[in-house]
Amino acid sequence: MAINNPYAAYQQNSITTASPGELTLMLYNGCIKFINQASQAIDASNIQEKNTNIQKAQKIITELMITLNKDYEVAKKFEVMYEYMNHRLIEANIKNDKEILKEVENYVVEFRDTWKQVIQINRQQQYGQGGQA
């Protein structure tokens, strides 16, 4: 299959060679994508597609919660925020509420952008200047 689809092969390779930090960044980006697709589905009155995409975003939030290192105090705060976002996604799904989706998207973008900075700082410390995420 990957031979017939170079894009799929590239995507699979980028996932299997990504660092844990880059994988987290991919999860945040995927969550944002699914929230946007759910919002578009609400506009199109496509309830099934909305539901599917919100559930995909929820699965990503759940994965982010599962992978938290709870040895650190900050992880407990992340967990509370992830639980809140998951609850809001459920509410958005029930109410077909794009405003709630936008709220959650804003949180995910904030988490993603902060994570990007962490990766960049880590690379700069590890390899010297440079290292864009």
Image (cartoon, rainbow, N blue to C red):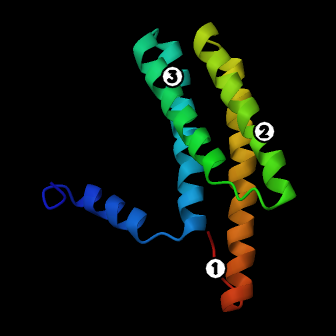
Which element is circle 2 on?
helix
Vertical relation: 22 (above or below) 35 = below
Q: Residue furthest front?
A: 71
At label 3, which amino acid type do we have?
Gln
Q: Nearer the viewer, mark 3 or mark 2?
A: 2
User: Residue type at mark 2?
Assistant: Met
Q: Which residue shows up at 13% across the image and 56% down it?
A: 4
**Eyeballing the image, is 20 above or below 2?**
below
Callouts 1 and 3 close, C-beta under 8 Å: no
Residue 118 position within the rendered picture, expressed as x and y whole percent measured from the top left: 74, 68
User: Helix or strand or loop: what does disc 1 sit on?
Assistant: loop
Residue 3: quarter of image: bottom left
For residue 112, the mark is none
Quote the CA–CA distance across marks 1 and 3.
Answer: 34 Å
Spatial distance from mark 2 to mark 1, Cα to Cα? 29 Å
Q: Which residue is mark 2?
A: 81
Q: Position of residue 8 (x, y in %)?
A: 27, 55
Q: Is residue 123 above or below residue 102?
A: below
Give residue 131's mark. 1
